[in-house]
Amino acid sequence: MLLEALILDYGNVLSHPQREDWFETMATQVGASANAFRDSYWRHRRPYDAGLPAAEYWRRVLKTLGQSSYALDQEAVIDRLVKADVASWTEYREEVWDLAQSFRGKGGRTAFLSNGVLEAMARIRADRHLERWFDVVVVSCEVGVAKPDPGIFRICLSRLGVEPARALFVDDRIENIEGAASIGIQTFHFVGGDAVSRLARAVRSLSG
């Protein structure tokens, strides 16, 4: 079945992964180990992706780390964490942006579908006019539902105006791939050093 739409995750697909030393640096700033910081960061991320305010997300992270004693300067700590977090997600993987632009230039429909937060999206939109690459932009914090919930995929398909079987969803997380596949969307698991070249071949093959 001819591919009509390409749906791209943002983090680790349109962007490079967060640097491992980022977790170490930020953990040191709040007096925690890198592993503890990483675990707390991801433990509370889903509500943040779905619209939880940044200050509350970081308060939960710090509390889990046993850092609630930051009461007097917590606002300053959180401000630094927010800025560092945004910076860690905005190293763009240009080859995938180029692939989206090429697919769209040949008449395909494109979508940016991300579990994202307001602060990061503000930076991304300031850096890039997303409409140059994408017909549709769906972000979890803006629609109140996050991957892998099938609801966010249905929102994206509705805005694209395509049937599930005629869309290809690309993500690095297997749970999100499974969420898309559960409603009939074709999927590509974006992992490994050759992910970009394999994706390009897959898009060419499916596009006829």
Image (cartoon, helix red, strand yellow):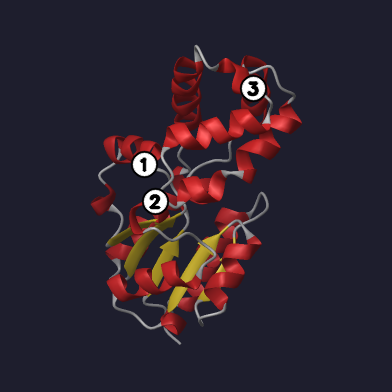
Q: x, y percentage for residue 18?
A: 58, 36
Which residue does the image show at 54% across and 51% down from the upper left?
Answer: 46
Kindly identify the amino acid type of the residue bearing the numbered disc 2: Cys
**At numbered mark 3, what does the secondary structure look like: helix, strand or loop?**
loop
Kindly identify the amino acid type of the residue bearing the numbered disc 1: Leu
- Relative to 128, is 27 on the left or the right? right
Q: Which residue is mark 3?
A: 67
Q: Which mark is residue 187?
A: none
Q: Quadrant of residue 166?
A: bottom left
Q: x, y percentage for residue 177?
A: 58, 67
Q: Earlier in the sequence, mark 2 or mark 3?
A: 3
Q: Which residue is mark 1?
A: 118
Query: Real-space Cα distance between discs 2 and 3?
Result: 26 Å
Q: Which mark is residue 141?
A: 2
Packing grade of label 1 (10 A; few <14, some 14-19, many >=20) is: many
Q: x, y percentage for residue 190?
A: 60, 58
Q: Which of labels 3 and 1 is toward the front?
A: 3
Kindly identify the amino acid type of the residue bearing the numbered disc 3: Gln
Q: Is residue 121 above or below residue 164?
A: above
Query: Real-space Cα distance between discs 1 and 2?
Result: 7 Å
Which residue does the image show at 34% across and 64% down from the upper left?
Answer: 110
